Image: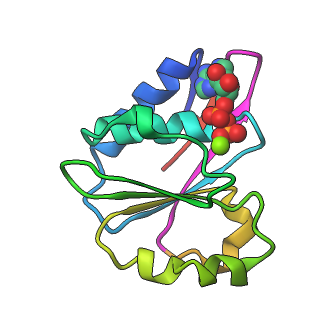
Amino acid sequence: MVQVTNSPLRTQELASKFAMRLSGGECIALHGDLGAGKTQFVRGLVRGLGGNERAVSSPTFVLLNVYQTPRFAVYHLDAYRVGGADEFEAIGFAELLEQGGVVVVEWADRVAELLPPNAIHIRLSAVSRMQRRIEFP
Ligand SMILES: Nc1ncnc2c1ncn2[C@@H]1O[C@H](COP(=O)(O)OP(=O)(O)O)[C@@H](O)[C@H]1O
Ligand SMILES: [Mg+2]
């Protein structure tokens, strides 16, 4: 499915709705350039699960953020600055996938070989200053 949103709030709302389909254990691979709206999407996802979306920030420098929600934990990773897949493995990526929470990875193509085969791929791109195209299954 492809949707075009025209504000960060709309992108968050779309993600909140998408979150209803999650049951825990999924890996969500986010694709898209800087500013495409990946982190805004995660914010909406966390809110959709009943968590505190204000806690959501880009984990670019810390690599991993964990948000608790009433349903399950959301593990938010950003592969933008990782040197390679081995660095991702070193922070325990494989173990995170087995916690029963949802693992969300920004810049997922940088660690493509580590993603589980059933990862849910979501592609975001800027159409104009305020419009984002979001493609998801
Ligand atoms: N429709 C939209 N959806 C999401 N973000 C948008 C939209 N329009 C403008 N923006 C802006 O684009 C930026 C997206 O930032 P962010 O989610 O951090 O991107 P990424 O994590 O992909 O680098 C924010 O500054 C946001 O305000
Ligand atoms: Mg980001």
Residue placed farthest to the front in the image?
Answer: 62
Magenta region: 118-132
For residue 77, which quarter of the picture? bottom right
In the image, residue 61 lies at what x, y percent?
Answer: 68, 54
What residue is rendered at 57% in x and 16% in y? 7
What residue is rendered at 69% in x and 62% in y? 79
What residue is rendered at 72% in x and 45% in y? 32
The reply to whether residue 124 is visible in this rendering is: no
With respect to residue 62, does 45 lie above or below?
above
With respect to residue 33, does 6 lie above or below?
above
Determine whether, in the image, residue 68 is placed left or right of residue 96. Answer: left
Residue 4 in magenta stretch? no
Residue placed farthest to the left in the image?
Answer: 70
**Picture quarter with ligand 1:** top right
What residue is rendered at 29% in x and 71% in y? 100
Q: Nearer the viewer, residue 109 or 66?
A: 66
Determine whether, in the image, residue 125 is placed left or right of residue 71. Answer: right
Snapshot colouring: rainbow
Residue 125 in magenta stretch? yes
The reply to whether residue 6 is visible in this rendering is: yes
**Label tally:** 0
In the image, residue 52 lies at what x, y percent?
Answer: 33, 36
In the image, residue 125 lies at what x, y percent?
Answer: 72, 35
In the image, residue 55 lies at what x, y percent?
Answer: 43, 39
For residue 80, which quarter of the picture? bottom right
